[in-house]
Image (tube, helix red, strand yellow):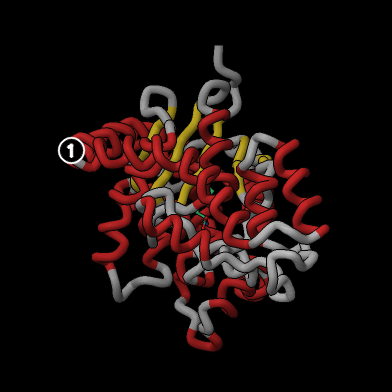
Amino acid sequence: MKSKDIVLTGDRPTGPLHLGHYVGSLLNRIALQDQYTQYVMIADIQALTDNADNPQKVRDNVMEVMLDYLAVGIDPEKTTFFVQSMIPEIAELTVLYLNLVTVSRLQRNPTVKTEMQQKSFGESVPAGFLMYPVSQAADITFVKATLVPVGEDQLPVIEQTHEIVRSFNRIYGKEIFPEPKALLSQVGRLSGTDGKAKMGKSMGNAIFLSDDEATLKKKVMSMYTDPGHLRVQDPGQVEGNMVFEYLDIFDTNKEKVSELKQQYRHGGLGDVTLKMYLFDVLNALLTPIRQKRMVLAENKEAVLQILLEGTKKVRQVAAQTMQEVRQVMHLNYE
Ligand code: TRP
């Protein structure tokens, strides 16, 4: 028996998924699908909020992201996949929610602020981008989700969803929407291979689930370690060393990792040897995913069908919710 809780998450299809997604959300979804009714949404409309000039990129990545989902083991028998743009009710609900939110509140949203800086929007931020938390509140609420597994950086967006739900329920006088709870993943954020920031496609510091073996090796070999560790016999720093950060997360052999750390600190363990070890660990994790992905990619039509079937199911949920919303908002004319 599944719990009554309803889980909704999603990703913007702006690139294939990477190891940051894997530890930050994919593992969570694989675990949650057995226990809960789970929806996974491909947020193509949200992806367009900062890619309006590049619809082909978004379109292509819908398939890449679906391949990643299925390859890691999110199971269409247990999880309902759908594509955001095929649920017009989300857009409808967004417009209604926009009246419950002020522009200054949106400008103060820490998630939006950070992303605006990263994308150097300044004053020319697209209005659609500024208000994406409102659209995300619609994503979450139209299925009446009660649990939203997200990374820490998305917490302010969930907080804003709470405010919208509270306003809506208070003004329109019915508890139509539950207040969703955020579910944080165990690994909050994975640093990029350069050690500078969170792993991200646009940062050029990501290891993708779809990277082939040679690419994986090249990326691991160029990872940021300890710049002061020049000769094999020198003592090296473990803290802030990306290879050790990744080993802590991905190597299940904790004893071995602790031995390696000791050896590295003491001196006598070279970066190349250490990186080869990490390569083996990551390659063992990624090889089955890569293989499954390749098989799936041979039949993209079938993958698309999975997405469309899920979307069809979700449409019914959306229609039902909108009917309730129209009624309490006195928008039910027939
Ligand atoms: N904003 C999320 C991200 O960039 C993607 C997303 C869109 C989402 N709608 C959502 C996540 C609803 C959780 C729930 O990662």
Q: Position of residue 185 (x, y in %)?
A: 66, 43
Residue 318 seen from this side:
no
Q: Residue furthest top?
A: 1
**Which quadrant, please, contains the C terminus?**
top left
Nearest to the observer: residue 40 or residue 234: 234
Q: Residue furthest bottom?
A: 123
Residue drawn at x 26%, y 37% is 296
Residue drawn at x 48%, y 86% is 124
Q: Is residue 157 above or below residue 252?
A: below
Is the shortest distance between ligand 1 and the CB of mark 1 under 8 Å?
no
Q: Position of residue 235 (x, y in %)?
A: 80, 65
**Which quadrant, please, contains the N terminus?**
top right
Residue drawn at x 48%, y 62% is 219
Q: Is residue 308 left or right of residue 230?
A: left
Nearest to the observer: residue 297 or residue 94: 297
Q: Is residue 222 above or below residue 300?
A: below
Q: Quadrant of residue 244?
A: bottom right
Q: How many marks?
A: 1
Residue at the disc numbered 1: 299
Q: Position of residue 160 (x, y in %)?
A: 65, 57
Nearest to the observer: residue 292 or residue 230: 230
Residue drawn at x 63%, y 74% is 113
Q: Position of residue 114 (x, y in %)?
A: 63, 73
Q: Is residue 190 left or right of residue 295?
A: right
Q: Quadrant of residue 289?
A: top left
Q: Quadrant of residue 297?
A: top left
Residue 16 seen from this side:
yes
Under mark 1, the amino acid is: Asn
* Mark 1 neighbour density, 10 Å: few (under 14) some (14–19) many (20 or more): few
Query: For the residue labelled by badge 1, is the local secondary structure a helix, a strand or a loop?
Result: loop
